[in-house]
Image (cartoon, helix red, strand yellow):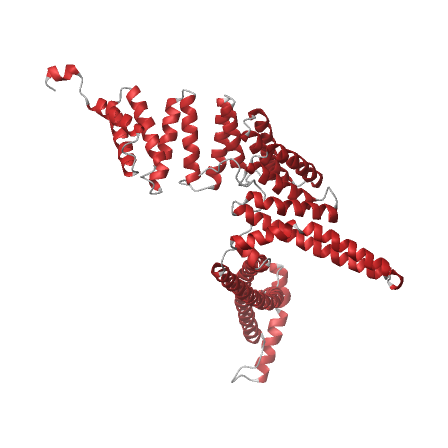
């Protein structure tokens, strides 16, 4: 549900639980370890994904290159076979065309054939002007041989290049696979660290759950010691100064500086412990007792860091918050203005917004609505500049809408409600209770503005969400049904009005409010809706 006025402001840490008083810093340390391990796992997972993608690309490239290599080898082998066939053909043709001594012929016959062929060569050349076919075929065979040889050489070079590329890709794939294995091992190691950190956190939670809460006597003892701390500290300081003056002859400046530094460190630790104690008391609702803690913290931090340190601003903010809860508005206003001044010096938008919201809540409690609206608007502006999706922004916008409603600026109020609803719809589930509560407030405002249809739709959304959450016996649902029934009655939809009123009455009865005057009025409305008009009685209907 929507927080009421005076709840802890945005960007301010929640008050400490007894767990932090039992073992301060341990949970934060283990949580930091777990968070660091989680970030490392995310980083390693991204790197592993990238390494696997690179490995896939290398494997795909290797496959394509291997296919190209096989095709080149096949083409080269085919060219070699073709070249070998050509050489065989040329050899057989040359042996067939060469004159030789045939079997069974005499030496004179062979010489005669040679002379005859030589004597007729000039006649053939003079008639045709061309070489013998055998000569032409021989010259073309030489050209074919050269081209085939060149093709074979080119294919051999291509095979060598592809082989080199395949070897390179195989080496790259091997390296990528090794990188993937290494990333897997790193992720497993980091996950083991994360699991160990989570187990340690669970053990600490169990120990904290088994630790008893601080009782009232212990709290009173803390407050008593805190109250007397300042006086004791001053007396001890004066005594130490006198002792130092008495023995200052043999004391060096370095020893004095070390002692002062150590004393300041102890005072700083004490102030932090008191700050946590004060927040714990606030969480327990012990506002008056927490004042002493924050006053002590403020005094110690001003002594250590000066008047404009951010830690001083934190102490002022918390004391102002407590005093506003106690109704001491004037003192709270002075403290919060000083805290706002310091936080604006450090330019921390979240802390500035937190103090602005406290100032707005304070003026809202005093019914100073104009001032409240101004501070809420300034707070919303700082949150939007820092992060439009800040979870505190919808709450500030809702408070601003309520303030505008008080001022009678209904349209402005509805605009801020709608802006908050838009942020909720982008960040929350569709059936979140915060959306339901906001729909209810918007429905009430819509009826005030005379927008019946819009108010009816908002109430129906509110009822739908509450029923979906299993909250059928809900007083808010009963109130919404009562208003819807009245709306149907005004619009002459008596059957619908009766249904809504009957359901609302059942819820009120289940809640044990049978004798409530409001319930009696509801019963009268139902009886009136059940009465039939006189005209229907005469018609016999």
Q: Is residue 443 above or below residue 284?
A: above
At 54% from the left edge and 41% from the top edge, which residue is drawn?
Answer: 8
Please state which of residues 504 and 153 is positioned toward the viewer in this rendering.
504
Image spot of residue 316 (x, y percent): 65, 41
Please state which of residues 448 and 311 is positioned toward the viewer in this rendering.
311
Residue 38 visible in the current orientation: no
Image spot of residue 317 (x, y percent): 63, 41
Query: Along the horizontal axis of the image, is 502 left or right of 304?
Result: left
Residue farthest left in this picture: 540
* Number of dots carrying numbers: 0
The image quadrant of residue 190 is: bottom right
Please state which of residues 22 and 475 is positioned toward the viewer in this rendering.
22
Query: Along the horizontal axis of the image, is 491 left or right of 75?
Result: left
Image spot of residue 20 (x, y percent): 56, 55
Residue 284 visible in the current orientation: yes
The quadrant in which the N terminus is found is top left
At 33% from the left edge and 43% from the top edge, which residue is drawn?
Answer: 470
The image quadrant of residue 465 is: top left
Q: Is residue 373 above or below residue 74?
A: above
The image quadrant of residue 65 is: bottom right
Image spot of residue 221 (x, y percent): 58, 54
Residue farthest right in this picture: 249
The quadrant in which the C terminus is found is top left
């Amino acid at each position: 549900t929507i927080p009421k006025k005076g709840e802890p402001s945005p960007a301010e840490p929640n008050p400490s639980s007894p767990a932090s008083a039992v073992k301060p810093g341990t949970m934060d340390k283990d949580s930091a370890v777990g968070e660091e391990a989680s970030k490392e796992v995310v980083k390693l997972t991204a790197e592993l994904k990238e390494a696997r993608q690179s490995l896939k690309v290398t494997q795909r490239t290797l496959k394509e290159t291997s296919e190209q290599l096989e095709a080149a080898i096949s083409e080269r082998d085919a060219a070699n076979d073709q070249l070998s066939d050509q050489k065989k053909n040329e050899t057989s043709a040359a042996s067939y065309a060469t004159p030789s001594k045939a079997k069974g012929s005499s030496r004179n016959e062979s010489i005669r054939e040679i002379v005859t062929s030589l004597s007729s060569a000039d006649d053939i050349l003079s008639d045709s002007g061309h070489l013998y076919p055998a000569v032409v075929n021989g010259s073309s065979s030489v050209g074919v041989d050269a081209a085939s040889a060149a093709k074979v050489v080119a294919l051999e070079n291509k095979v060598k290049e592809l082989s080199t590329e395949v070897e390179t890709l195989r080496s790259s794939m091997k390296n990528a696979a090794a990188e993937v294995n290494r990333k897997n091992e790193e992720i497993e190691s980091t996950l083991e660290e994360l699991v160990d950190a989570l187990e340690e956190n669970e053990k600490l939670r169990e120990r904290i759950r088994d630790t008893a809460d601080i009782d009232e006597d212990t709290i009173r003892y803390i407050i008593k010691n805190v109250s007397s701390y300042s006086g004791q500290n001053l007396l001890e300081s004066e005594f130490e100064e006198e002792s130092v003056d008495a023995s200052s002859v043999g004391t060096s400046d370095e020893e004095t500086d070390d002692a002062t530094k150590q004393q300041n460190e102890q005072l700083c630790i004490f102030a932090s412990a008191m700050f946590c104690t004060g927040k714990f008391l606030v969480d327990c609702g012990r506002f008056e007792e927490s004042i002493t803690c924050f006053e002590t913290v403020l005094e110690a931090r001003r002594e250590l860091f000066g008047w404009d340190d951010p830690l001083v601003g934190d102490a002022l903010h918390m004391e102002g918050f407590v005093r506003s809860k106690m109704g001491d508005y004037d003192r709270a206003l002075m403290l919060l203005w000083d805290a706002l001044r310091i936080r604006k010096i450090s330019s921390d938008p979240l802390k500035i917004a937190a103090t602005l919201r406290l100032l707005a809540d304070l003026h809202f409690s005093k019914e100073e609505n104009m001032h409240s609206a101004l501070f809420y608007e300034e707070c919303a502006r700082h949150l939007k500049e820092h992060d439009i999706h800040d979870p505190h922004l919808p709450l500030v916008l809702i408070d601003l809408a309520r303030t505008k409603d008080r001022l009678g600026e209904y349209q402005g109020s509805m605009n801020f409600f709608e802006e908050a609803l838009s942020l909720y719809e982008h960040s929350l589930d569709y059936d979140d209770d915060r959306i339901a509560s906001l729909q209810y407030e918007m429905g009430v405002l819509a009826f005030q503005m005379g927008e019946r249809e819009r108010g009816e739709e908002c109430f129906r959304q509110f009822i739908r969400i509450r029923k979906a959450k299993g909250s059928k016996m809900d007083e808010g649902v009963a109130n919404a049904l009562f208003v819807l029934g009245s709306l149907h009655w005004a619009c002459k939809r008596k059957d619908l009005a009766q249904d809504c009123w009957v359901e609302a009455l059942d819820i009120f009865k289940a809640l044990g409010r049978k004798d409530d005057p409001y319930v009696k009025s509801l019963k009268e409305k139902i009886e009136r809706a059940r009465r039939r008009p006189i005209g229907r009685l005469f018609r016999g209907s």
